[in-house]
Amino acid sequence: MKGLIYAGMALVVMGLGFWAYRENYATQASLREVGQLRHEIATTQARLDRLAAEWAYLNRPDRLRDLAELNFQRLELLPLTPGAFADVNQVAMPPAAGSVANSPMIVSSGGTIETEEPL
C-alpha cells in the first residue's frame, strides 16, 4: 500500500514538473510576442510622428499661398476674407419657445396625438 502511495506521489510530482516546464516555455513565448508587439507599436508610432511632421511641413501657410498663386489659372482660389462668410442675420434660428414643436403632447387611448395648450 505504501508503494502505491509513493508511486502516486511520484507521478503527481512528475506531472507538476511537466506542467511547470510547459508553463515556463509558454510564458517565454508570450513575453517574446509582447516584445515584438511593443517594437511594432514603437515603429508605427515613429512612422505616425514622421507623417504628422511631413503633414505640418506640407501645410505651411506660405507654401499653400505660393501653390494657390502658382495654380490660380486652373484652380481660381482666392484668399479668405470676412466677406466670404455668411452674415449672422442669414443663419436660421431655432423656433421660439412657445411654438407647437415645444408644447406638451398627450396621446389618447385611440392613438391620436393632441397638443396641450400652454397655460
Image (tube, rainbow, N blue to C red):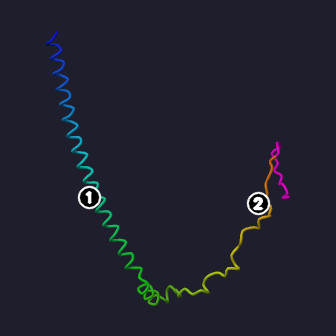
The percent coordinates of residue 102 (x first, y second) are 76, 60
Mark toward the start of the polypeptide (1 vs 2): 1
Q: Which residue is mark 2?
A: 102
Count of numbered tags: 2
Depth check: give the residue in front, 113 or 78: 113
User: Does 23 appear above or below 75?
Assistant: above
Q: Which amino acid, mark 2?
A: Asn
Q: Main secondary structure of the magenta part?
A: loop
Depth check: give the residue in front, 51 or 107: 107
Give the residue drawn at x 75%, y 67%: 95
The percent coordinates of residue 119 (x first, y second) are 86, 58
The percent coordinates of residue 82 (x first, y second) are 59, 86
**Between marks 1 and 2 in the image, the one whose residue lies nearer the viewer:** 2
Q: Residues within 10 Å of mark 2 (few under 14, many from 20)?
A: few
Q: Are marks 1 and 2 in contact (CB under 8 Å)?
A: no
Looking at the image, the residue that sits furthest to the left is 3
- Is 61 positioned to the left or the right of 43 in the image? right
User: Does 4 appear above or below 114?
Assistant: above
Q: Secondary structure at mark 1?
A: helix
Q: Quadrant of the N terminus?
A: top left
Is residue 59 on the magenta stretch? no
Give the residue drawn at x 34%, y 69%: 49
Residue range in magenta is 108-119
Q: Quadrant of residue 2?
A: top left
Q: Quadrant of residue 63?
A: bottom left
User: Does 63 appear above or below 118?
Assistant: below
- Is 117 positioned to the left or the right of 79 in the image? right
Q: Which residue is mark 1?
A: 39
Q: Which amino acid, mark 1?
A: His
Cα–Cα span, label 1 and label 2: 57 Å
Give the residue drawn at x 39%, y 75%: 55
